[in-house]
């Protein structure tokens, strides 16, 4: 069972009693590998007991009994949830409700969540969500107390993920940084090197075995570090080496600093609550504050979740499923990490390309990236919807089982364009001449235009030239006039 069982607290005696006498409680918590999940459920079921005196085994037994016995139980639990809501503790009420449902499902008293008679409490008052700009985020970085804090903020901003990734299902280690060169790190002269120049894959909600194999869970996904975050990580690790620490794959990624001791105690690694406080303190120090409605005190405007939202909003040009996958939302995790490609190594490279394209404004562009961007921008100019463009790309890469090159992407889109034209103009298996474009002269009399002409950027020429367009004239500012005969 989890580490927190031996800690003191107001519910310590209750914990010991239930561990000894309540098998429904014990077997329920044993269903979860995550200590964080176990702790949260334990705290919420203890909150329920404090208000109602209900125990886990009593809840299960009375619910299974049905009839008036079940109804009386539901009334007691409903009264507790209503009281919490009236006190303004809607998040607590929601998690108490979730703990009850989880207990009933895992102990076989309830089949599925939707069958539970009580509705989950909802937050009727919408609280403000604050998201920093990139400039504000960079201002916050200047007030980090140490390289570790600077990297922590950068990981949240450039990789997304909830604060819980820090120690769920277990504390993050250097092995979670999948593109970190561990051989160079373990040499006689340790060196911080990465296997990719532009991005670094990072495993979230998962672990890496001693043989380097990824241990996956239902929430496991991979996001990436942008060059800015890679630099901060390198600074953090180099400082630890200078202090005499011998780094290995098993070393914790986030280790305590002196300013953690008042909150983090003697823990061997950073905890999520402390991570939240670090980001809030950076926000306050940078001057981004708001007033606490309950106490009237000023607090940090931006939180760890604010940085996650900034990351999500920075993703451009990819479909919603890919955005969800990169930010660790369950819809995207199921679609990409447990659906599209089953082998983790392949899905990592699939999502790396998605990440680099979506974050292109913050990454150094390569010639290959620029070509892909030009090809996709050309398809947009042709009036193709984003969903159709992304679907064709996904189908191609699923067939290839890898990221498509710019040439493969160009050929795929060219096939689609030609197929569209054949569908529009074909009769009895033969393509008929397309109606020529029309223009007007002398105040509106239409005439047939012999050519279709466009002004485009230079990086769009690759695909156009392959489709039969000719360059007519180069303009200033890198723009080019191209044309082709109307068919």
Image (cartoon, helix red, strand yellow):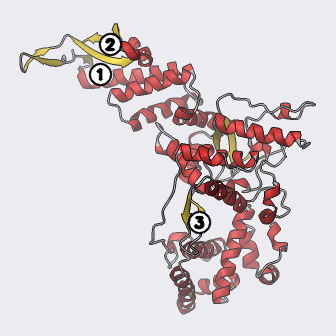
- Percent across and percent down for residue 271 are 75, 59
Q: Label 1 near label 2: C-beta < 8 Å?
A: no
Q: Label 1 vs label 3: CA separation?
A: 65 Å
Which is nearer the N-term, disc 2 or disc 3?
3
Q: Label 3 near label 1: C-beta < 8 Å?
A: no
Q: Residues within 10 Å of mark 1 (few under 14, many from 20)?
A: some
Label at residue 422 = 1
Against 124, residue 141 (above or below) is above
Q: Label 2 vs label 1: CA separation?
A: 27 Å
Residue depth check, mark 1 versus mark 3: number of the one nearer the observer: 3
Q: Label 3 near label 2: C-beta < 8 Å?
A: no
Judging by the rendered image, the residue that carries numbered circle 3 is: 298
Q: Looking at this view, is 99 or 254 the one in front?
A: 254
Which is nearer the N-term, disc 1 or disc 3?
3
Q: Secondary structure at mark 3?
A: strand
- Indicate the quadrant where residue 39 lies: bottom right
Q: Looking at this view, is 292 or 427 the one in front?
A: 292
Q: Secondary structure at mark 2?
A: strand
- Percent across and percent down for residue 242 are 88, 39
- The residue shown at (51%, 41%) is 315
- Percent across and percent down for residue 483 are 29, 11
Quarter in which the C terminus is drawn: top left
- Indicate the quadrant where residue 401 lies: top right
Q: Secondary structure at mark 1?
A: helix
Judging by the rendered image, the residue that carries numbered circle 2 is: 481
- Percent across and percent down for residue 230 are 70, 36
């Amino acid at each position: 069972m989890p580490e927190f069982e031996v800690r003191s607290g107001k519910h310590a005696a209750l914990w010991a009693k239930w561990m000894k006498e309540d098998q429904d409680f014990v077997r329920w918590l044993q269903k979860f590998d995550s200590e964080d999940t176990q702790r949260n459920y334990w705290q919420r079921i203890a909150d329920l007991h404090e208000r109602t005196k209900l125990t886990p085994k009593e809840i299960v037994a009375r619910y299974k009994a049905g009839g008036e016995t079940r109804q009386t139980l539901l009334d007691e639990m409903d009264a507790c949830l209503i009281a919490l809501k009236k006190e303004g503790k809607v998040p607590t009420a929601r998690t108490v409700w979730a703990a009850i449902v989880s207990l009933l499902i895992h102990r076989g008293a309830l089949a599925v969540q939707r069958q539970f008679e009580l509705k989950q409490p909802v937050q009727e008052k919408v609280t403000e969500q604050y998201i920093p700009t990139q400039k504000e985020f960079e201002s916050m970085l200047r007030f980090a107390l140490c390289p570790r804090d600077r990297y922590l903020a950068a990981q949240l901003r450039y990789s997304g993920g909830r604060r819980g990734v820090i120690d769920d299902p277990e504390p993050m280690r250097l092995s979670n940084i999948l593109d970190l060169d561990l051989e160079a790190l373990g040499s006689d002269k340790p060196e911080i090197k990465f296997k990719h120049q532009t991005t670094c894959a990072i495993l979230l909600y998962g672990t890496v075995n001693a043989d380097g194999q990824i241990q996956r869970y239902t929430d496991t996904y991979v996001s990436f570090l942008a060059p800015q975050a890679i630099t901060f990580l390198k600074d953090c690790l180099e400082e630890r080496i200078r202090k005499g620490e011998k780094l290995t794959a098993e070393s914790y990624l986030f280790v305590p600093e002196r300013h953690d001791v008042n909150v983090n105690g003697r823990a061997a690694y950073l905890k999520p609550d402390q991570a939240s406080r670090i980001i809030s303190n950076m926000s306050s120090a940078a001057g981004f504050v708001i007033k606490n409605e309950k106490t009237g005190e000023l607090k940090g405007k931006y939180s760890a979740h604010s940085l996650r939202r900034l990351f999500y909003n920075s993703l451009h040009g990819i479909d919603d499923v890919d955005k969800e996958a990169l930010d660790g939302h369950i819809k995207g995790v199921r679609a990409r990490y447990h659906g599209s490609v089953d082998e983790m190594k392949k899905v990592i490279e699939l999502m790396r390309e998605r990440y680099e394209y979506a974050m292109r404004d913050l990454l150094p562009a390569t010639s290959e990236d620029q070509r892909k961007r030009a090809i996709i921008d050309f398809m947009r100019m042709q009036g193709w919807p984003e969903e159709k463009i992304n679907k064709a790309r996904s189908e191609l890469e699923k067939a290839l089982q890898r990221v498509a090159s710019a040439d493969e992407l160009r050929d795929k889109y060219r096939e689609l364009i030609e197929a569209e034209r054949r569908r529009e103009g074909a009769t009895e298996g033969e393509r008929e001449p397309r109606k020529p474009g029309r223009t007007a002269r002398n105040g509106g009399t239409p005439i047939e235009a012999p050519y279709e002409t466009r002004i485009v950027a230079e990086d769009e020429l690759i695909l156009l030239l392959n489709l039969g367009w000719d360059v007519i004239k180069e303009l200033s500012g890198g723009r080019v006039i191209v044309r082709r005969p109307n068919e």
